[in-house]
Image: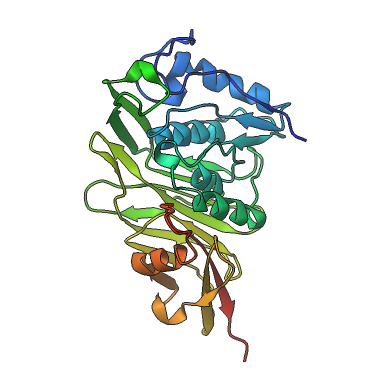
Amino acid sequence: MFVENCNVDGPLNDAGCPWCGAKVTNTGRFKNWDNGNILKNAPAMLSFSPVYRTYDVSNIISIPTTLDRVTSLLEYYNYPEAGGLINCEDEPYIGAGLGCALGIMRYPRSGLTKGRFDEVVRAVRWQRIAPAFPVKTGETVADTTILIDEYIFKIGETWVDWIYGQKTKQLAPAKVARGMNLPTVISKGEKPFVICSRNPSGAVTVATLPRLAPKGQFFPLADVSITIEKLDEPIGVFGRYKSLTVECANLPVGFSIFAQDLAGDKAIDITDLVEIKSNKIILSGKVLEEVGLSAKTEGDVSEPGLMIVLKENKQ
């Protein structure tokens, strides 16, 4: 049994709430909240606690809030040598993408999580291969480009009822990498959030996350590129893409590529469906979506999630 600890904060970063006494400047950034004191308290807890919980957030705009909290905690420089896990609450693809523990809290009739249960299965299954790992493991790099999500909440859309009718903003880095280089992201217009990590197990994960505007949630597609070190590193791929390029300096002359929806139990050979250029493997967004949703539950609206494995052909 692990006991988790947390700061009892409000559901929106650097924004006021009825029970919070923290000073706010309404920047939408976790690191600015209460003059940075909330962030500074976290390492003290992680020095003794097996798990630090990023705490409750508002539904609908939860992705940038949670991503900014996780990123701020991971890149904060003053961690002890030993440290616990980060529980990123009910954001399974952030947990899978950045090596965080999950705190799933959803049921079929509530908000954006309605009909989104396959993504939980996919994230949990991937974490059998790439489990959550402690804060001090692997350097975290965050993009200097910050994306802004905004939304005007209607009555009944969130439990955070004091923000009804107000334009609410939350900010987070456009790209975050843990234990590897930042991904390359090319997109016309708006970009998705893109995160990636190399797990101590050797597995690599990349995930794209949707955005939020007053018109609602949307998912801009981008050409994303990541670099892996070895052919035998399994790759977890979550979200939607225009394309995904996987670069490896030591690609052999002959190899096969297998992929499997993490909600299913069957892998398929997709070698003939990808483009190979020198040391790069290019997968189209269409292939990733078709495979990543091939075992979806009827009526479920989760985003794709799949595992890719490259195997050298033995002569």
Location of the C terminus by quadrant is bottom right
Residue 277 in sight here: no
Left or right of 253 in this view: 3? right
Location of the N terminus by quadrant is top right
Residue 278 in sight here: yes
Report the residue at 50% width, 36% height from top: 71
Report the residue at 41% width, 52% height from top: 301
Name, please, the residue furthest toward the right.
Answer: 1
Pick the front one: 277 or 104: 104
Name, please, the residue furthest toward the bottom.
Answer: 315
Report the residue at 59% width, 37% height from top: 103
Residue 78, position as x, y percentages in the image: 61, 27
Left or right of 121 in this view: 293? left
Residue 255, position as x, y percentages in the image: 53, 81
Q: Is residue 159 above or below residue 89?
A: above
Name, please, the residue furthest toward the top.
Answer: 21
Q: Quadrant of residue 25?
A: top left
